[in-house]
Image: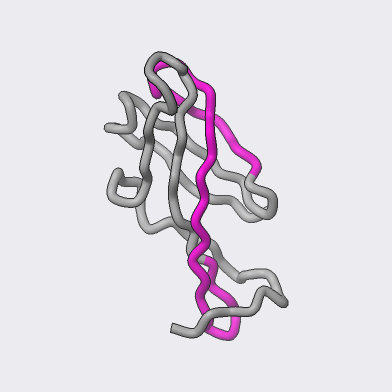
Amino acid sequence: MVVHNDKVPPTTVTLKSASARFVSIVETAKNSNVWKLSFNVTETYSDGSVKVVPYAVQIRANNANIDGRYDLGKYTLVYDIKGNGSNIKEFRIVMK
């Protein structure tokens, strides 16, 4: 796998799938209603190179039933997660 040098923006960005296998969802402290989501974004470039970028974001929500958008800088995370992460209805990255 060739690693890109970030001189040009990626042509596509992807998450593997909307499953607990690649998304970690944990409450930061008991009854805090602050949840940490950890996941990797795969950036693919026109020259065929690939870069995997890890992200960890904190979102305030009640009982891990969380939905909305989160600004990641060059991307927007769109999410809809129910039941403490057991049911991921939507989890995707949108390029700005």
The residues colored magenta run 43-71
As rendered, which of 61 and 79 lies closer to the eye?
61
Find the residue positioned furthest to the front: 29
Examine the image and state in which quarter residue 7 appears: bottom right
Q: Residue placed at 63% from the left, 47% from the top?
A: 72
Q: Position of residue 87 (x, y in %)?
A: 30, 32
Q: Residue furthest right?
A: 7
Please provide percent x and percent y for residue 35: 45, 29
- The residue located at (44%, 32%) in the rendering is 80
Residue visible at 53% across and 33% down?
Answer: 58
In this rendering, the answer to whether 6 lies above or below 74 is below
Which sits in the foreground, 63 or 93? 63
x and y percentages locating residue 42 in the rendered image: 48, 64
Q: State whether residue 85 is above or below residue 29.
A: below
Number of numbered discs on residues: 0
Depicted 81 relative to depicted 21: above or below: above
Query: Which quarter of the picture shows residue 6?
Result: bottom right
Residue 79: image x %, image y %? 48, 37
User: In which quadrant of the rendered image does the N terminus lie?
Assistant: bottom left
Q: Residue at x 69, y 50 (%)?
A: 73
Left or right of residue 20, residue 93 in this image = right
Q: Please give left or right for residue 77 compared with residue 39 in the image.
A: right
Asked whether residue 60 is drawn in magenta, I would say: yes
85 relative position to 47: left or right? left
Examine the structure image and report whether residue 85 is included in the region drawn in magenta: no
Magenta-highlighted stretch: main secondary structure?
Answer: strand
Q: Nearer the viewer, residue 21 or 87?
A: 21
